[in-house]
Amino acid sequence: MTDKNPFAHVPSEPGAHKEDPIIIADHVQRRFGGLTAVDVDHFEVQRHAITALIGPNGAGKSTFFNLLTGFDKPQKGEWLFNGKSMKGVSPAKVARAGKVRTFQLTKALNRMTVIENMRLGAADQRGENIFAAFVPSLWRQREADITERAHDLLHRFKLYEKKDDFAGSLSGGQRKLLEMARALMSEPEMVMLDEPMAGVNPALTESLLDHIVKLKNEGVSVLFVEHDMHMVRRISDWVVVMAEGRIIAEGPPDTVMLNPEVQEAYLGVHHDTDLSEESSS
Amino acid sequence: MGDLLVDVVREAFTPTTAAFALAAVGLNFHFGLTGLLNMGQAGFMLLGMYGFAITVREGGPIWLAVIVALAVSMVFGLILGWPTLKLRGDYLAIVTIAAAEMVRYLGRSQNFNSLTGASTGIRGNEFKGPFEDLSPFPDRMVDVGPFAFHGTRSTSWWLILVAWVIVAIFILIFARLSRSPWGRVLKGIREDEDAVRSLGKDVYSYKMQALVIGGAVGAIAGVIWSLGASVQPDSMGRPTTFWIWTLLLLGGAATIFGPVLGSILFWCALVLIKGLAAMWIPDTVLSQEQLQPFSLLLVGVTLMLLVIFRPQGVLGDKRELAFND
């Protein structure tokens, strides 16, 4: 991370070109029958930065998220990750390419222990091949390395004491933390967080925010979907606003909400109310 | 009473008990590890015994017959899994139960009489010879303590030895695999497919591997079963699949020794209940031929109670089921 603001020369307009984009999407369209859920002309995400994707309910944020991670397929469009086309690439391969996501509804693997959840997140474990699985000497060393990394991450996310507990016994917030820690096991270049704050109590929110900022400082690019405007203002470097499937505005967090189009789309009739109160609804 | 006790203990190690334990080990790959609802394990068993018996009958050596049994069941698994493993779990249950019935109906159809012997099946003396020739035991009844089995033929000491050695081998394989990173991926799939996808694992391929391996283990179980009896398509109908499920849940799904313990408990309980019923219930109330269905019914009730009050099975870990939301 340099001191220079990578967004210094980026215009505040939809589809703005970034200095060093890690994701580039073009003409991505996803229709469900007659409904066009996502219709994005151009979209770029800056590398080594925290980008927030916001918008009112039904704006197509989550659908767009699913498209970018391979969990859904659009009718048309092209999108690149790190210069490589991700069109028609399976979710697993997207993850192996270095772009790992989390889910709005937490997907902790409940009947597995916390440490096993973590180990599963690691990449390049040869023992995951059925034939190699018979020969522990092929994967024992890697398993030890993985476990060490898992311990480090669990310490960092304050879950180390829980490592031998079943993930199902954790609280909702702890599961969110576990999911994020697990996503980091494969040392991804980019993490995509789908509503990381949903259902997390305020005490944990603070530490989650810190974790996300720390990720950026370590050189990981972050794209997240969120409703909570406080969080968006606090940690994001750049905000992209979606409404009715389209990107209607982009800009730095302090100014993007002043855009009249955003206010109209995002706030509708509740024009004058404090956004932070909106977040809880 | 003493005779009944001998019968019960004898049941614990018969080839049938071993065969069902092995079939349950196969199902444990499907359900216990991966969460796949295979409702057609009997179909895999039947295909295995057809593959084995027909190869031997046509003059093939035993090793080839075993390979054919494995190959046929594995191809069956591939064909079943190819369209269904992309769908949600319940579809696999529907397809497997139907496919297993199709195998049985095709096997017993007159059109394939020359191959499968239709509903009569393939009699033991047509395919057991080469296996029994390998027996190191004498060709007569042998008493060991209170237990009497033939040395070599059909349900023999020889088959008991081979069957349990095979069960032991597959339990070792299951233990090795379930505790490996490979097994960890399968358990992850059991919990949440999409989460495992998001971590970069090729879920479809892992589910296919589990289905094919579990089915192949089922095929070997079928071969063992047929060596103690004969190849008879109707003995591999839906009830067989349900018994395998029952004894797997009884012993404890996802555990290593659950299938063996479940099979022993199931078959011994059946003999015990049948024996006690024969002793205490007069003929006028329940005739001799009604005893079998009656004891199955009682076993069913017992198992229902067990699954309600101890859902993790005898050996299972309560925490693994308690968080099932």
Image: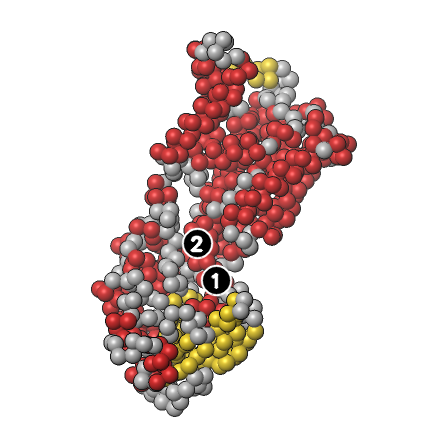
Q: Could you tell whether A207 is left or right of A16 in the image?
A: left
Please tell me in which quadrant of the rendered image residue B15 appears.
Answer: top right
Q: Is residue A39 left or right of residue A274?
A: right
Q: Nearer the viewer, mark 2 or mark 1?
A: 2
Q: Say which residue appears at 61% left-offset and 47% top-offset.
A: B80
Q: Amino acid at mark 2?
A: Asp
Q: Amino acid at mark 1?
A: Gly
Which residue is rendered at x = 50% and y = 80% of the image? A41
Q: Secondary structure at mark 1?
A: loop
Q: Are marks 2 and 1 in contact (CB under 8 Å)?
A: no
The image shows residue B86 at horizontal and vertical percentages of 55, 55
Q: Is the residue B21 above or below the residue A68 in the image?
A: above
Between B223 and B267, which is closer to the camera in this rendering? B267
Name, please, the residue furthest toward the left: A203
Q: Nearer the viewer, residue B186 or B292?
A: B292
- Kindly identify which residue carries mark 1: B200
Q: Quadrant of residue A256?
A: bottom left
Image quarter for residue A226? bottom left
Q: Is residue A137 visible?
A: no
Disc 2 designates what residue? B192
* Residue projecting furthest to the front: A269
Question: Looking at the rendered structure, which numbered label has been put on residue A79?
Answer: none
Chain ID, mark 2: B
| Residue A263 visible here | yes
x 38%, y 67%: residue: A194
